[in-house]
Structure formats: C-alpha cells, structure tokens
Amino acid sequence: MYRPKFDITPELLGSLTQATELKAWINSAVIDVPWLPALQRDTAARLAHSSTAIEGNPLALPEVEALARGEITGSPERAAREVKNYLAAMRWIWNKKAGAAVTEKDLLHLHELLTAKVMEPAQAGRYKTKPNRVIDHNGRTVYTPPSPDRAQPFTQDLLSWISGAEAAKQHPVIVSGVAHHRLVSVHPFADGNGRIARALGVWLLYTRGFDTQHLFALDEFYEADRQRYYDKIQQARDLDDDLSFWLEYSAEGVVETLQKTRERIMSLQVTAQAPKMRLTKRQEDILRFLRDKGRAKAPDIEAAFGLSRARVGQIVKPLVDAGLVLREGQTRATSYRLA
C-alpha cells in the first residue's frame, strides 16, 4: 500500500491557510456574476497552454485561445491536437460530479482523452508495455521510472490512497500535490505522463471542493519556471520520496495562482451593475482598457486591439446598452468611459 512521506512544515501550513482564505474569497465573489463563464473558458485555455507547453508544445497562448473558440489556426497538426485533447480532458473533468471517486477506469479514460491521435491507439489509455525514461534537454537520462510490470499495481496503490481514510484527513492541496508527484514518478504510460499527472492534480482540487468554479490555472505556475518544476520533482526523488519540499512548492503555486485570480476578479467588479450581461473576453479587455485610460476615443480602441471601427461598435454597444460604459460625442470624435 502506498503511503506518502511528508511533514507539514510551518511554511506549508502557512500556504495552506492562505490558500484556503483566498479560495473562500473567490467563491464568495463569483456568486451569480455575469462574467463567470468567460473566466472559466479562459482558465481552460490557460491550463491547456501551460501544461502542453511544459511538454514542448510550441503554440502561443493566443493560438490556444483561438483553438478553444473552435477557430482554424493553421497550427501544426500534432500541436493543435495536443491542445484540443487537453481542452477535452478539462471539459470531461469539470462535467464529473464533485466529490466522486477517481477510479482506475476514469484515469485510463483521462489518459485516452489527453493522447488521442497523438499516440498509437494501442497505447492511449493503456499502461506501458516497455521501459521508459526521463531525459533532459541534452538527452541524458535523469530518471528511470518503475518497470512496466509495476505500472498498474503502483497506480492502483496511489488511487487506493487517494480514496482512503488517510487522504480524507488531508487538505485538498496536499492530496493534489501528492498525486501529481506520485503519478509522474510512477510514469505508468508510454507518453503523456506529465500531462496526466497535472490533470489529475487539477481534478482532485475540483472533486475535493477546492476549485468548484474552475477559475485558476495552476499549471501556469509550473510552466513559468520549468527548470524549477523539474528540479522540485527530482529533489523529492533524491530525498527517498520525501515530499515535504515538493508540497511546499506546489502549495506556493496554488497561493500565487489564487492571488492572480483574485486580482483579475477585482479588476472586473465594475460588471456587478449588469447582472444579466454576459461578457466576452474582448469586452473584458476593453473594460480594463477604459479603467486604465479613464477615457478613450474609438480610434484608440481600434489601435489598441487591432479592430475595425465597425467591430469596435459591435463590441462596445452591448456595454453601453447595459450601462457599463458611457458613450460621449459623435462619429470619430466619440469617446468612451466607464459608467
């Protein structure tokens, strides 16, 4: 039976307390708000971008956002497929019932979603049958995972721990961090191990009630400093799988991500005046632009966002009609400011 080793250090405890407070603030701030779906779509795109980027996917965030909107981007087929797979995996996770157990069948299906059409069909959603290894950018082996015959029993042991009494007593951030590290270390699949380990971490935060609104993209923290991410994973292995420092690091990531989420929500508080208004991401951007500028003419908005005059009118008119933005003047002299 798998039993993770770690100490709840003062630093870890402080991060867990801070994360819990931030999570409570965010949950109370987004009750019945009109822009929640836009934030959720943006979070899914950011997760897809950062998690696949860690694995070497070359697509920039705007390309990923375009794919999330269903647009044709001309991106390399494999890169686009990896992103679409991750988006599909997030939709599948978020459509699951909160609190439901994470089963082996579900985990294998998640891997199949993440690797569809980028792995051989015989490998997607199935345990590895050949040894694999982790190499660095110079091609040197930095970690040799357990052999194929241990892939399934080790994964089953992890899932048993996740659903057991010991994990039930732990903070969701700890359970998520333990599962992330253990699965990527077991490396039970021929490919896609990093993606599924991070997706499992996201899934556990959701199913244990910590990210019920799907508003923070933790993988951005890992992707922002990939070498530190790799180093922290390996550090725990070098310490005979003592996860104390790894959990401090992953909890730090949760706090930083939640702080950014809070800042974004606070920047959108102006929309509380219009409870029936459903903002697009471009409308969010324009509201922030007006908040920062104070007042802007139509040509300023056109130049800032690369939009035509007609398109600016289409985007801004609903904001004016909802009473969020005031329009002053006529024709090209028209200016806009927040109500």
Image (cartoon, rainbow, N blue to C red):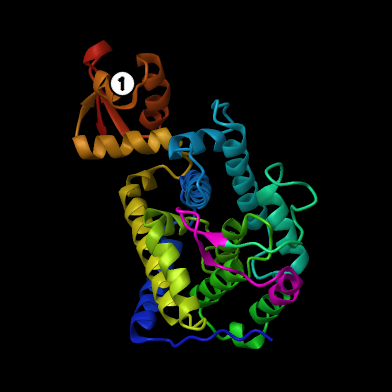
Let me know if residue 339 appears in the view.
Answer: no
Secondary structure of the residue carrying tag 1 is: helix
Quadrant where the N terminus sits is bottom right
Which residue is label 1 attached to? 302
Q: Nearer the viewer, residue 237 or 310?
A: 237
Q: Residue 223: horizontal and vertical position, in percent?
A: 42, 54
Q: Residue 301: horizontal and vertical position, in percent?
A: 29, 25
- Pointer 1: residues within 10 angstroms few (<14), some, or many (20+)? some
Extreme residue toward the top, this view? 331
Q: Nearer the viewer, residue 259 or 220?
A: 220
Task: Identify the magenta region.
Answer: 134-155
Quadrant where the C terminus sits is top left
**1 relative to 258, above or below:** below
Question: What residue sits 65% from the left and 55% below the top?
Answer: 191
**317 relative to 236, above or below:** above
Let me know if residue 35 appears in the view.
Answer: yes
Left of 60 or right of it: where is 85?
A: right
Q: Amino acid at mark 1?
A: Glu
The answer to if 152 sits in the magenta stretch is yes
Q: Quadrant of residue 78?
A: top right
Q: Quadrant of residue 166?
A: bottom right
Left of 188 or right of it: where is 143?
A: left
**301 relative to 331, above or below:** below
Q: Residue 270: horizontal and vertical position, in percent?
A: 32, 45
Question: What residue sits 61% from the left and 60% below the top?
Answer: 193
The answer to if 85 sits in the magenta stretch is no
Question: What residue sits 35% from the left and 56% below the top?
Answer: 260
Extreme residue toward the left, this view? 294
